[in-house]
């Protein structure tokens, strides 16, 4: 595993996600969000889960980021007053970060190098999805359908009220 | 420096905390959604990392969970954004501070 | 062949359930499609039941099971399955057939209802859930279906949800039975803890077979009693019978279904199903748990018969008669007459459905009038309803020889008379028989004879779609009397696994004459008292105080209001007080801590960063907003609470390592 690639991707991802979380302008944040997810997808590639990385790019960068941009456009009157951070939340978030980081660094069993693995082919993923995970797959399909219909109903104009 | 499991976990915990920061401290509903998506991505990263560094050979459970979590996160984003739009129509704002109809 | 049927036994409940799902997805305006689908589902279930029933006929004591692993957690797997034995097969036949009659009747009865389609979806669901209870070979599967039956009854009792009384009755039915189910669930847990399996029959390893029973040992009594709690709730036994009469708020076909084929039968069936738990370690056929069953049954049977005498609502009288008949069945199970109890349950299913549908026909003819004092003289106006109702009334009163209820009731008496523990239940049962005949005669006279009164002015006979099921059920009630005759105890042998012999001499028994005399006495007494039935009740004139006592259901509802419900409300008020004073105080204290913390950060802001006055004000305002946010009930506060909880977990982790 290439350590230079790791460092570059880590810096890119974290910087982009920090920007997504803290930039005052929503549209900038949405674009950084897309970059951050490209970075996460790169991590997946680095870890040998290329298929998941591709899915990540398609779903997040292709669909979710675009959705966010659309939502921003639809609710654009509001984009201005977002600058201020809420300090109570920030303190808690930083404290959680510190606590988790301490727990990870303290656990020495985690400092292991990656073993050799055979490549995870799409064929194998497909096989597993259609055998062991066929019920979860169906459930997720149902869930996505329900989410689609639910979202449509939520945003549908209520004509009766005019 | 060879990237160890620990380093991946450090990255993912940082990502998670950034998401938490956005979800906890931003006022705009869309930022909260972005934060939640970041946290979910951090969790997926963890799953994949543990799968990659675990003893081999093993069934690709972590990868499967990551795939499902991506699908579910997408559903969540769709419904969440639809709610943002619906709420915006109703209140003419997306500032969560002003959604306090459930106030005790 | 056998294997294939047993493996696919699940199709029987699945057919009505699938029909229900399809109907639910139809538009509300597709009325005929809904009814047809429901009936198709029920016909499929009936056909398969007949097929299954024919299998169980051949060797005595037939039993076939199909078990499989539902899911694994760790090393342990949870197994469920279905069982086909005479008990299940007889119930399947009864439920499917009676259900079908009720479905067809509903087409006529609910013709004008705007939610016609939904009604059939619920009916199918109800029937499917009950069929599931019957075939379950696992206490867990049984419990799941049992709760589905409860849900269906809730939906159906509250079907006319716009009526507040119907909504309240549905809630009451659901909550009251839930009290019993709590005990049932505890019993299941205890059983699983002891025997390690929830399967009834599993090649000798099931909890009703030797190995499981030995593992249970002395705790079987408690397990049996806890499971009996569930049966008490579902079958409307004292002290949880209060929901059953209120359930009359639902449409009449629903009452018929609840009282005849599904809901209340489930409790009796459950006791019969887990009977080995009750009878474990019996000395001379008596165990503590069985004695409890007998006592509850006797109390219920007598109390309900007395209350029925004081009721004026045609359906309530029938409801209390159901309660009392269920008590009778419980007594029968308790004294060891399992086959007699189940036979009575099956016979009762037919004639009680008949009576309820007859009552539905009467109500339909009298413009939704329920008060028997306002009816009268319907004999000539509704001849078919009158004749079939008379058959049902004779069967319920237990008139022997030609009506099904008579033989089974006599069998129960026979079993009770030979109970070694005490003769008291037997004598009380005899009193109950007189009372049953009395209140049924009273009802018949009020409704069908005498002069026409307010509601019967424009009464008319119902359409064939409603009278046909009545005729079918009435003929079943009579035909069953042939099948149930003790001279050829075929069904008895079928249920117990013994072979039957034809023996006419068995007919001539002292209990036969005793019950014949008592029923005749009850009917004669009824004619004597109610001959001149008018707007007022003769008993009310003679004994007003006693009559009030019965009319008001012995004030049990009021008693529960004063005790159980008052206690619950007090507990609710107490928690409200704690919420307001204790927890609110804590929240305030927390807020105060936040304020101290806030002032600390303000100072830090001012001195550390040396910010200007402007910034300090914004900072203070921001902190003020944070602090006020603690009290605002916004989502981010909840998210923050989650964050704080994670922190606390981390602290705990650090402290432990």
Image: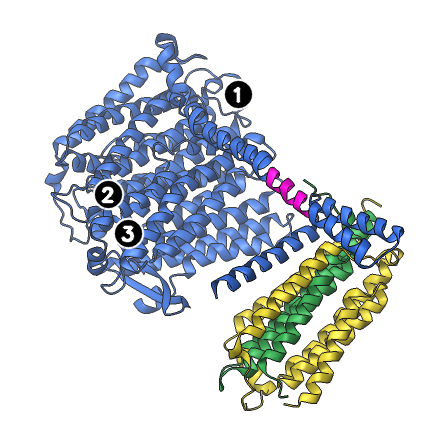
Give the Cα separation between the discs numbered 2 and 1.
Answer: 39 Å
Mark 1: few/some/many CA within 10 Å (<14, 14-19, 20+): many
Which mark is first along the chain, 2 or 3? 3
Q: Which residue is mark 1?
A: C455
Q: Say which chain is yellow.
A: A
Q: Tag on residue C484?
A: 2
Which mark is first along the chain, 1 or 2? 1
Left or right, C294 with reference to B30: left
Left or right, A112 with reference to C56: right
Residue B80 is situated, as x and y percent measured from the top left of the image, at 72, 59
Residue B48 is situated, as x and y percent measured from the top left of the image, at 59, 78
> Quarter of the image holding residue C524?
top left
Left or right, B67 with reference to C606: left
Magenta-span inclusion, residue C260? no
Q: What residue is shown at x 16% (from left), y 53% (from top)?
A: C498
Subunit under mark 2: C
| Nearer to us in this view, C455 or C232 | C232
Give the Cα separation between the discs numbered 3 and 1.
Answer: 44 Å
Residue C354 is situated, as x and y percent measured from the top left of the image, at 39, 37
Q: Which residue is mark 3?
A: C87
Which-is-in-front pick, marks 3 and 2?
Answer: 3
| Nearer to us in this view, C544 or C446 | C544
Q: Colour of chain C?
A: blue
Which SS class for mark 3? Answer: helix
Q: Say which chain is green.
A: B
Q: Tag on residue C572?
A: none
Numbered range of the magenta stretch: C584-594
């Amino acid at each position: 595993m290439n350590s230079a690639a790791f460092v570059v991707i880590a810096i890119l991802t974290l910087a982009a996600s920090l920007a997504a979380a803290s930039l005052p302008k929503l549209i900038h944040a949405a674009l950084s969000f897309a970059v951050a997810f490209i970075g996460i997808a790169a991590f997946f590639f680095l870890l040998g889960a290329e298929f998941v990385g591709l899915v990540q790019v398609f779903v997040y960068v292709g669909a979710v980021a675009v959705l966010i941009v659309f939502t921003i456009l639809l609710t654009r009157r509001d984009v201005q007053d977002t600058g201020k951070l809420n300090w109570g939340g920030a303190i808690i978030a930083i404290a959680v970060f510190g606590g988790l980081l301490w727990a990870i660094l303290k656990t020495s069993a985690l400092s292991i190098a990656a073993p050799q693995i055979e490549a995870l082919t799409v064929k194998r993923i497909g096989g597993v999805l259609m055998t062991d995970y066929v019920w979860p797959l169906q459930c997720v399909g149902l869930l996505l359908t329900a989410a689609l219909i639910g979202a449509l109903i939520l945003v549908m104009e209520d004509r009766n009220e005019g | 420096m060879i990237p160890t499991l620990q380093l991946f976990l450090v990255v993912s915990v940082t990502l998670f905390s950034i998401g938490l920061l956005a979800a906890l401290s931003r006022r705009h509903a869309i930022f909260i959604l972005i934060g939640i998506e970041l946290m979910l991505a951090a969790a997926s990263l963890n799953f994949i990392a543990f799968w990659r560094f675990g003893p081999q050979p093993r069934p690709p459970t972590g990868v499967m969970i990551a795939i499902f979590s991506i699908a579910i996160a997408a559903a969540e984003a769709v419904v969440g954004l639809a709610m943002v739009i619906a709420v915006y129509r109703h209140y003419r704002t997306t500032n969560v501070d002003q959604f306090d109809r459930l106030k005790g | 062949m056998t294997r294939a049927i047993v493996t696919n036994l699940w199709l029987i409940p699945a057919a009505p359930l699938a029909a229900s799902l399809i109907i639910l997805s139809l538009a509300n305006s597709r009325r005929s499609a809904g009814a047809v689908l429901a009936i198709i589902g029920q016909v499929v279930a009936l056909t398969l039941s007949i097929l299954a029933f024919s299998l169980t006929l051949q060797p005595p004591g037939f039993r076939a099971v199909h078990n499989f692993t539902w899911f694994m957690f760790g090393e342990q797997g949870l197994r469920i399955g279905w069982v086909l034995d005479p008990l299940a097969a007889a119930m399947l036949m009864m439920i499917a057939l009676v259900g079908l009659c009720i479905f067809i009747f509903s087409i006529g009865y609910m013709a004008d209802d705007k939610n016609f389609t939904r009604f059939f979806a619920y009916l199918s669901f109800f029937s499917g859930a009950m069929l599931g209870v019957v075939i379950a070979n696992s206490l867990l599967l049984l419990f799941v279906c049992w709760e589905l039956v409860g849900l269906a009854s809730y939906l159906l009792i509250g079907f006319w949800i716009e009526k507040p009384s119907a909504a309240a009755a549905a809630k009451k039915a659901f909550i009251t039975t839930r009290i019993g189910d709590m005990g049932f669930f505890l019993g299941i847990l205890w059983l699983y803890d002891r025997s390690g399996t929830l399967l009834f029959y599993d090649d000798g390893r099931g909890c009703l077979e030797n190995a499981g029973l030995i593992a249970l040992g002395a705790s079987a009594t408690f397990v049996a009693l806890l499971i009996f709690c569930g049966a008490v709730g579902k079958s409307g036994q004292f002290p949880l019978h209060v929901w059953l009469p209120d359930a009359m708020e639902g449409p009449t076909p629903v009452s018929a279904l609840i009282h005849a084929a599904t809901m209340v039968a489930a409790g009796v069936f459950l006791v019969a199903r887990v009977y080995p738990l009750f009878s474990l370690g019996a000395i001379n056929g008596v165990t503590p748990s069985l004695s409890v069953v007998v006592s509850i049954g006797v109390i219920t049977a007598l109390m309900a018969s007395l209350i029925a005498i004081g009721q004026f609502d045609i359906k309530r009288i029938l409801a209390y008669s159901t309660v009392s008949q269920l008590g009778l069945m419980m007594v029968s199970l308790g004294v060891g007459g399992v086959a007699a109890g189940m036979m009575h349950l099956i016979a009762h299913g037919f004639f009680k459905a008949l009576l309820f549908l007859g009552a539905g026909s009467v109500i339909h003819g009298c413009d939704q009038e329920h008060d028997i004092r306002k009816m009268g003289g319907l004999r000539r106006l509704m001849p078919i309803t009158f004749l079939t109702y008379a058959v049902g009334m004779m069967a319920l009163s237990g008139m022997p020889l030609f009506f099904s209820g008579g033989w089974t009731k006599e069998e129960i008496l026979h079993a009770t008379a030979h109970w070694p523990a005490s003769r008291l239940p037997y004598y009380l049962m005899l009193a109950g028989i007189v009372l049953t005949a009395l209140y049924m005669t009273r009802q018949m006279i009020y409704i069908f004879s005498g002069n026409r009164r307010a509601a019967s002015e424009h009464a008319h006979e119902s359409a064939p779609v409603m009278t046909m099921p009545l005729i079918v059920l009435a003929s079943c009630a009579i035909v069953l009397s042939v099948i149930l005759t003790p001279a050829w105890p075929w069904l008895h042998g079928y249920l117990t696994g013994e072979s039957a012999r034809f023996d006419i001499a068995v007919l001539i028994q002292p209990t036969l004459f005793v019950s014949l005399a008592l029923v005749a006495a009850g009917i004669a007494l009824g004619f004597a008292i109610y001959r001149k039935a008018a707007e007022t009740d003769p008993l009310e004139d003679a004994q007003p105080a006693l009559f009030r006592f019965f009319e008001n259901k012995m004030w049990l509802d009021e008693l529960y209001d004063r005790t159980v419900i008052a206690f619950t409300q007090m507990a609710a008020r107490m928690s409200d007080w704690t919420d307001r004073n204790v927890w609110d105080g804590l929240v305030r204290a927390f807020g105060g801590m936040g304020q101290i913390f806030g002032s600390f950060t303000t100072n830090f802001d001012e001195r550390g960063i040396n910010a200007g006055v402007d910034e300090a004000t914004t900072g203070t305002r921001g902190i003020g907003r944070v602090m006020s946010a603690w009290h605002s009930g916004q989502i981010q506060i909840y998210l923050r609470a989650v964050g704080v909880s994670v922190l606390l977990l981390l602290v705990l982790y650090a402290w432990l390592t």
